[in-house]
Amino acid sequence: MKEKPKSVEQEGPGPFGTVYVPPGRRAKITPENTVCAGKISEIPLGSAKSILLDKFNISLFHIGGGFYAVKEACPHAQYPLTKGKVVGETVTCASHNWKFNVRTGECLRGEEGLTIKTFPVEIRDGEVWIKL
């Protein structure tokens, strides 16, 4: 009897904030080590978007007229920050309520002195680009 193939896609975050992302769904990284997150018009003010990469994901936030990118996994329990609540420049992790400044990466509630990785963002020809 043939075994049913196992799904390679996980439900939710895996260890260390990684989720298996099939190559066709990953964002394309340029030789300059940048990734296009999409057109400005596709990312409404007040929203967050998950950028799927090979080894980790990025949370992109459109707030206050600007775009801010951070490593998506909350360091406490690896929960996706894209699913958190954003007020001003602060995202609150939906899992355990840790808070981070999306502009600086500073942990505002959680482990003192901790910061999450931030990525420079620039706008080019109406598109949002993230420097890795």
Image: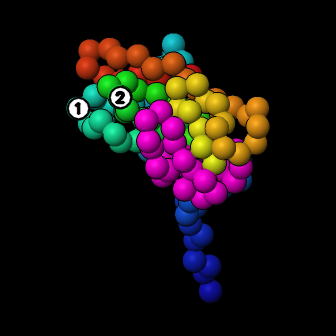
Give neighbour class at mark 2: few <14, some 14-19, many 20+ (Cα, 10 Å): few
Percent x, y of residue 25 = 44, 44
52 vs 31: above or below: below
Q: Quadrant of the N terminus?
A: bottom right
Residue at 51% of width from left, 38% of height from top? Answer: 90
Q: Which mark is residue 88?
A: none
Residue 58 pos. (x, y %)? 53, 36
Q: Quadrant of residue 60?
A: top left
Residue toward you, 116 or 30: 116
Is residue 120 in view? yes
Helix, strand or loop under label 2: loop
How far is mark 2 from mark 1, CA to CA?
A: 15 Å
Residue hosting label 2 = 64
Which mark is in front, 2 or 1?
Answer: 2
* 123 left or right of 90 in image: left
Q: According to the image, what is the colour scheme of the structure?
A: rainbow
Residue 17 picture location, percent across and down: 65, 48
> What secondary structure predominates along the stretch shown in magenta?
loop
Q: Which residues are magenta?
A: 73-97
Q: Residue at x 30, y 35 (%)?
A: 45
125, above or below 75, in the image: above
Amino acid beneath label 1:
Ser
Residue at image x 37%, y 24%? Answer: 66
Question: Does 88 lie within the magenta span?
Answer: yes
**Residue identifier under label 1:** 41
Label 1 element class: helix
Total number of numbered labels?
A: 2
Residue occupying image coordinates x 55% and y 63%: 11
| Residue 128 percent location from the top left of the image | 36, 24
